[in-house]
Amino acid sequence: MASTVVGKSISRVDAVAKVTGKAKYTADFFTRDMLVGKILRSPYAHALVKNIDASRARALPGVEAVLTYKDVPQIKFATAGHPYALDPKHRDREDRTILTDKARFVGDAVAAVVATDELTAAEALKLIEVDYEVLEPLLTPEAAMREGAPLIHDDCERNILSSQGYEIGDVEEAFQEADYIFEDELETSIVQHCQLENHVSYAYVDSDGRIVIVTSTQIPHIIRRIVGQALGIPWGRVRVIKPYVGGGFGSKQDACLEPLNAAMTLAVGGRPVKLELSREECMIDTRTRHAIKYKIKTGVSKDGKLIGMHITAISNTGAYASHGHSIAMAAGSKFRALYPMKALKYEPLTVYTNLPVAGAMRGYGSPQLTFAVESHLENIAKKLNIDPIEFRLKNLVKAGYVDPLNGNTVRSCGIRECIAKGKELIKWDEKKARYKNQTGTKRRGLGMACFSYASGTHPVGLEMAGARIVLNQDGSVQLQIGATEIGQGSDTVFAQMVAEVLGIPVDMVHVISTQDTDITPFDTGAYASRQTYITSMAVAKAALEVKEKILDFVWGMTDIPAHALDIKDQNIVYKHSGEVVMPLAEVALHTYYDTVFARPITSDTSNNARINAFVFGVTFAEVEVDLKTGKIEVLEIYNVHDSGKIINPQLAEGQVHGGVGMGIGYALTEQMLFDEKTGKPLNNNLLDYKMPTIMDIPDIGVAFVETFEPTSPFGCKALGEPPTIPVAPAIRNAVFDATGVAFNRLPMNPQRVFEKFKKTGLI
C-alpha cells in the first residue's frame, strides 16, 4: 500500500496547544501553599567550606528549611543521563553530592533555602554565613594537569578524568608511506545551550509516601534512578512526571535540579517545593559545551588520498564529570565513518577544571571534532592546490563500510548526492570563478564541510524504547510512548507512523505527550538523535500488533480470513480489491461491547535495538568579510542531509533551521567568558552572551537526499543533532577562501578576525 501519511508535511499534533498557550509547562503547574527553593552558590571557583552557620537564616520568618551538606545525604552520584550500566566499569562517574562542602566552580551549590516566597528565600540566602578556605583555581586543562596542582577530585590523578582512545592500523607506518605530512592545531570554545525554558522542577511527597517530581527534563526514567541513588532510597519510591518541555539541546539530559528538589520536599515534610533557576543561574550551573583543543597530523598520498591521521584532543569538562569523556569518545567514533583510511589514532584527554560543568550539547562532541577535521582538510587541500570538494570525494565513505571497532555498518549513504545538490544550490563553480581575483576591503568566499553521525548509541549504550497503543470505541487510538517530546516534533512523527500502519487519519491518533515513570513505557530519553529511528521500531511493532488483532477480530465476526483483509481510510477492506467490508469504528465498538466476543485491543511493546544507522550531510556557505572591521556576514547557507526517509518534511526543515542557527552562533559570536584569575563568569546573561538573533541569521537553505535505511521500519535515520555539526567549519572555510587567512579557533568574532588580519599583514 502506498504511503498516505508518512512523508507528508502534516501539522504538529501539539501545535494548537502551544500557540494558544494551553500547553502546560512545569512552571505552569501550581499547588496550594507551594514553597519556593533557592540555592546559595559559592563565590569562589575552588574552595573548602570550613564552616557554615545558617542560624540567622533559619530564624527568618517565612523560612521553612535551610539545607547544607550536613542536612542531605553525602552519597556521590552521577548526574549524566546515560542508561544504567550493569557493569560498574561502564557507569557514569559518580562525583557529585546534592550539596557540597568543597566548591569546584563559581556557582557551585553549598546551601539551599526553602521559604514561603521568593523574596524571603533570597533574603535568607544573605543571612547564611560561610567560611571558605580558598584554593588555587585551575581554569585551563594545562593548569589542572601540571605537576603539583591541587586535585579538584581527590581520586583523579593530575585532574585527568579519562584518557581512553583507540588506534586502527599503525599510524606511524602510514605516515612513512605518505608523500606529504600536514599538521594543525585547532580550538573550540565554551558555549551555552540557551534553550527558551529555564531549568525548573517541583517536588512533593504523595499520600503513599513517595516522592513525586514534576520536571522539565529529557530523561524522566533516568532521573528517577538518579534521584533514588542520590537519596539512598529504592528507585520505586520516586515518581517523575515530564510535562511539555521548552527545549533542552542536551542541557536537560542531566539531573541538574531534581536530587536537590527532592531533598527540599523531604526537609519540609513532603510539602510541594518549586525550584526554578534564573537565566544567569542556568548559564553557570546547568551544562555547557566542552571546549576542546586539537592537534592533528595527517599523511596524504600524491593523488590526494588520506593514508593516516593522528588526532590528540584535550577536553575541558569543568568541575564535574557529567557526560565527561564519553563526549570525546562519541565524536571520535562518529567521525570514523566519514573518511575511512589505512590508519587512525585518536588520543583524547578529558580534564577537570574549576569552570562550569560541560556536558551533552547538540552534536555530542561532533561539532568540535568536525570543525577541527574539516578545517584541517581544507588547509591540506589549499596547500596541495586541490579543489576542496574533489579532495573530499576522493576519500569519502561508501555503502558497505563496516566500522572496525564497533561493527556498525553503512547500509545507506547519500553523501555524494548531498555534495552534488549543495554545490548546485550555491552555484559553486560560477561563484568560485567570479571571486577568483578579488580586491578591496570586502571580499567573498565559498566553503563547505561534511559530517557523519549515528542514529543512536548502540553498541556503547542501551537503546530501549517502548510504545503502548489502545484502540478506542470510536476507532481512534491512544498512543503512549516513553520517548520524550522536547520540542523536536517526535510526537507528531510517531502519530504519523501509527496512522500509516492502521489506515486512519493522524487526528485519530491521540498522543499522550506527558511522560510519567509510573505509567509510561520505559525509554531512556531524548538524546543522540535516536528517537525517530529507535522508537519507530517499538511504535511499528505496537501498531502492527494492533492491526493484526483488529483483522483477527474481524475474521471472527465475518469468517473472512485476516490475511485477506487490510485497513484503509478507517475501513476494513479486502486487500486485493479495496472493497469495504465494514467501518473500523464498528469493529472497535464490538471489541468493547460484544456480549460474547468482546476483548479490548491493546499493545504494550518494547524494543531493544541492537543496531545503528549512519547519517551524512554537508553544509555549503557563502560569506562576505569586511577586512576593516573583521565582521563576517553569511550571505547564503545550505544544509543538505541524508537522513533516510523524511517522515515529515516541514518538521525536518524546522529542525535544520534551528540547527543551522545554532551553528552560526558557534562559528561567529558565542563563547562563555570567565575572569582569568578567579573563574568568575563575565557574560552569563543574554545581553552579554552574544547569541545571534533573527536579524543575524540569513535565509537558510534546506535540502534532503532521501535514501532508504533498511534497518528502520520506515526507512528513516537521525536528524535532530546533525544540522549543527558542519556549519562552523563551512563558514570558516568560506572565510579562508575569501581572505586566504586560516582561522583555527572559534568563535571568529570581529575582534579576533581583525587582530589576525593585522598579524598576517592582510590589513
Image (cartoon, rainbow, N blue to C red):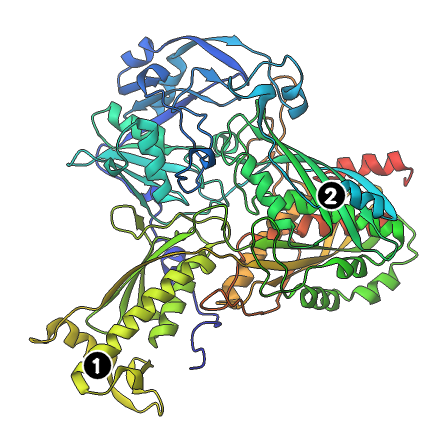
Look at mark 1 in the image and give the residue it sits on. Answer: 554
Circle 1 — which element? helix
Residue 414 point in image, percent of width and height: 64, 66
Mark 1, other Cα within 10 Å: few <14 / some 14–19 / many ≥20? many
Query: For the point 17% across and 68% down, which residue is it?
Result: 600
Total marks placed: 2
Q: Identify the residue under disc 2.
A: 170
Mark 2 crowdedness (10 Å alpha carbons): few <14, some 14-19, many ≥20:
few
Q: Secondary structure at mark 2?
A: loop
Image spot of residue 24 (x, y percent): 33, 49
- Looking at the image, residue 414 sits to the left or right of residue 628; the answer is left
> Which-is-in-front pick, marks 2 and 1?
2
Is 749 placed above or below 599 here?
above
Q: Residue at x 39, y 21 (%)?
A: 99
The N terminus, quarter of image: bottom left
Give the residue type that dot 2 points to.
Asp
Give the vertical position of 152 relative to 273 (above or below): above
**165 or 232, which is in the foreground?**
165
- Earlier in the chain: of badge 2 and badge 1, it is 2
Above or below, comparing residue 220 to residue 135 in the picture: below
The answer to whether residue 451 is above or below residue 106 is below
Q: Quadrant of residue 266?
A: top left
The kind of residue on which mark 1 rests is Val
Q: Position of residue 146 (x, y in %)?
A: 67, 18
CB of mark 2 within 8 Å of CB of mark 1? Answer: no
Q: In the picture provided, is 304 more to the left or to the right than 22?
A: right
